Amino acid sequence: MLRFPKDFVWGSSTSGPQTEGRIAGDGKGDNLWDYWYQVEPNRYYNGIGPDKTSTFYENWEQDIELLVETGHTAFRTSIQWSRIFPQGRGEVNAQGVDFYRKVFEAIKAIKAKGIRLLVNLYHFDLPFALQEDGDGWENKATVSAYEDYARFCFETYGDLVDQWITFNEPIVPVEFGYFYDAHYPHKVDAEAAVKVAYHTQLASSRAVKACHELLPGSKIGIVLNLTPAYPRSQHPADVKAARIADLFQAQSFLDPSVLGTYPQELVEILHEHGLLPDTTEEELELIRDNIVDFLGVNYYQPLRVMAPRFAKHPESPLLPEHFYEPYVMPGRKINPHRGWEIYEQGIYDIAQNIKENYGNIEWMLTENGMGVEGEEKFRENGMIQDDYRIDFVKGHLRELYRAIEDGANCKGYLIWTFIDCWSWLNSYKNRYGLVELDLKTQERRLKKSGHWFKELSDNNGF
């Protein structure tokens, strides 16, 4: 049996915009997803938008009971900025403030059972008013608005939250909002992408500083999807492609967040293409002096790349594919329901990288899971028999255990996710939960994996 360290925590991650939903009169303002659904609902799978999601806003008491039933000793969720500040700044929505306090107090009340509460401040959900009034993260004014929001949260909920998180996967809105048309404002603009990335990092560093000032002794981190980039071959061009992919995908936020500086090669590439953002020495000093206390690591699949096969057309916009191309490895193991590669060793490789290059900073695996379309076909005797999900988790935990044995400073495993949740443009196409959500009735039903996860937590291993 693989037994994890004594204080290792087991739980799940989710987010406010993917679970809460909206009801009339709740005072919440629109975020980017709310607005985009209003103007282009056809983009969302089966037309299900962010107003529905998993009705946590109405059913949170029942859902918190399910945390205990599934053996949680840790839980990560997020505060929706637009539920606290409907316009992103200024007037506060008292209903939203009270909602999160009730939820966090309820989780704190069962801390005797050992549930550690991690709260994320931003999960792809910029208040739309900040986008409409000032181009969102392209504008440094949004950095100041975010800092004000973060300070409000620290002051309001600091007595309830065990660990804070500044951003979840900040590279994702950069990529999909400014290159690939899957996040609002769905632009194709490399200069704007770099500006957004820098402003997001600046906001994160300001939040770290504010947290340490207002809540001395509290821990604050950032959650990054540290997808390892593997070259097709050891040919120098493929190796270079993988190195640049890692610079863009991981190190662009990992290095400034943990080391306080940007990789020199990344700076040189941006300079070469005229993409360096406007910075000040004061800002760079702020980033240097305010590194995170811990990392959250999200991992689903590897990134396999090769050198580009084609030269960039002189009139085409600059895209990451100018530097590297995705590579489909023959014989790879895949999740047939989602089409993603399953490569458990990626966990071990991430752990080794953190240990060797980032001071073995404390970290937690904050997302790892298996999405399945049409999961109802696996229902037997009223329960979804998701042995495939159990096997997926076991495979990754074996690699995580090996990494810990070799010195990795990993403190917990949080599966994605607790209850089937809404997944942006994919809505409910792929199900990830330990608990099934019936979209018609909103009934919650444990899957086989939910029962197994409790055994995993109770035994601190398998």
Image (spheres, grey):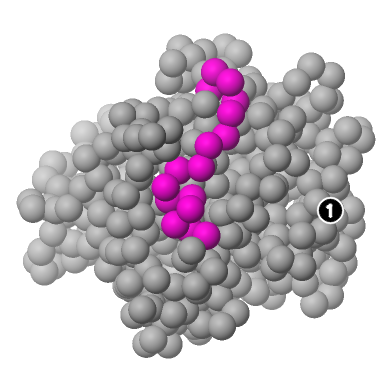
Q: Is residue 336 above or below residue 331?
A: above
> Label 1 amino acid?
Glu
Helix, strand or loop at disc 1?
Answer: helix
Residue 238 placed where, x, y %?
15, 61
Residue in the picture at 19% in, 66% down: 239
Residue in the picture at 53% in, 37% down: 445
Q: Is residue 448 magenta?
A: yes
Residue 214 placed where, x, y %?
87, 67
In magenta, the rendered stretch is 439-454
Residue in the picture at 24% in, 50% down: 341
Using residue 33 as the reference point, say whether residue 31 is left or right of it.
right
Using residue 349 as the reference point, say whether residue 460 is left or right of it.
right
Q: Is residue 228 magenta?
A: no
Q: Residue furthest front?
A: 381
The answer to whether residue 25 of the structure is visible from this angle is: yes
Residue in the picture at 70% in, 47% down: 64
Residue 177 placed where, x, y %?
48, 35
Using residue 342 as the reference point, say whether residue 428 is left or right of it.
right
Using residue 322 as the reference point, say whether residue 132 is left or right of it.
right
The answer to whether residue 151 of the structure is visible from this angle is: no
Q: Is residue 408 above or below residue 80?
A: below
Disc 1 target residue = 105
State the residue in front, 50 or 103. Answer: 103
Residue 53 placed where, x, y %?
59, 28
State the residue in front, 156 or 173. Answer: 156
Quadrant location of residue 162?
bottom right
